[in-house]
Amino acid sequence: MKKFVNDPKQFVPEMLEGLALANPHRLKYVPEHNLIMRADAPSEDRVSIVQGSGSGHEPAHVMIVGRGMLDAACPGDVFAAPPMNYVYETAKLLASPKGVLLLVNNYTGDRMAFDMGKEMAESEGLKVEILTINDDVAVKDSTYTVGRRGVAGNFFVIKAVGAAAGRGDDLDEVIRVGKKVNDVTRTMGVALTACTPPAKGSPLFELGPDEIEMGVGIHGEPGRERKKMTTADAIVDELLEAVVTDLPYASGDSVALMINGLGGTPISELYILYRRAHQQLAERGITVTRSYVNEYCTSLDMAGASLTLVKLDDEIDALLDAPAEVPVRVF
């Protein structure tokens, strides 16, 4: 597998350095902690919003650090949680009188690292809280998790808490907003191919030329079923049925619909998926009032996609409508 790589061990640091060099007035890079932070952070008049997770999911999370979104991101290596000291040092650097909110996708390694980093920060008198994101409906438990996984739906939580922090809400209110959005967000994905981590140099798992993995995780974890390839419409119908019936979403609801590419799927194909999802939601009496078609939370170069729905009300709609400015245009 051909990739633009120098030393695989330097894949993440070199990516972060390039990101910072391309955005010198917006971002600051702290190499000793794998940290990308807003150049103007922290601020005394807002809660600092921090996300971590492994690398390999870009633009999540390092490429959405900016006004109205994250104040910082401290990733680990590819598909690996950041060390707890990265979390601890990030919390210290982002400390604000209004507090620090750590957003954690529900993976065992991430939760352990952030829990321990939070405890270390609190031992020094810092005000730090954690909000766990778990929007994936595909499986209850997986290779990496206890409970549901956090996947592309985390973007909506980030956008909401970033907007709430930006208007000056206190930490408890920012957490309330984040929990509210997480509770009405559901996602499921599908893989057409495996991904290839730079350090491995070969596919992470094997899929036959006519096979797909329904409900795949963003680290290549098994999903609900490995089955034969079928049409785009049939794939969307299966994803949508799983997502809609989980909350459940109902006739009369207004929703945000996201079709997220997993890294190796042309955007033209993503719009084919969006078309079918929009049509099927309309048939169910569910109105799409916000649309998102792009790569938001990827799995390196995996061909595949995920479908996310967010049930909207006036409050959530206003939070998603708030201005944001980040290196990669996602909202």
Image (cartoon, rainbow, N blue to C red):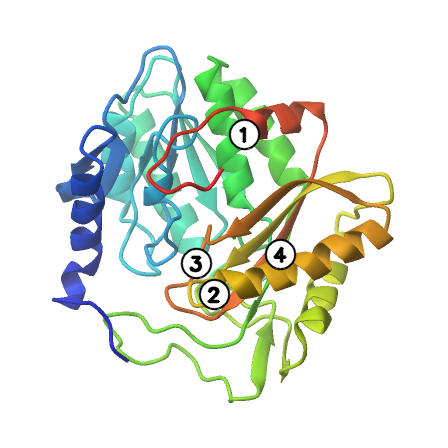
- Whichever of callouts 2 and 1 sits on the residue coming sooner in the sequence is 1
- Residue 307: mark in rendering: 4
Say what amino acid the circle numbered 1 marks.
Ala
What is the distance, in whole Å, between disc 4 and disc 1 at their CAs?
19 Å
What is the distance, in whole Å, between disc 2 and disc 1 at their CAs?
28 Å
Q: Position of residue 52 (x, y in %)?
A: 36, 44
| Residue at which label 1 appears | 160
Give the foreground label among 2 and 3: 2
The reply to whether dot 2 and dot 1 touch (C-beta < 8 Å) is no
The reply to whether dot 2 and dot 3 touch (C-beta < 8 Å) is no
Mark 4: which secondary structure? strand
Could you tell me which quadrant the N terminus lies in?
Answer: bottom left
Q: Nearer the viewer, residue 181 or 95?
A: 181
Mark 1: which secondary structure? helix
Q: Position of residue 143 (x, y in %)?
A: 49, 67
At 42% from the left and 31% from the top, the residue drawn is 69
State the image quarter where residue 124 is shown: top left
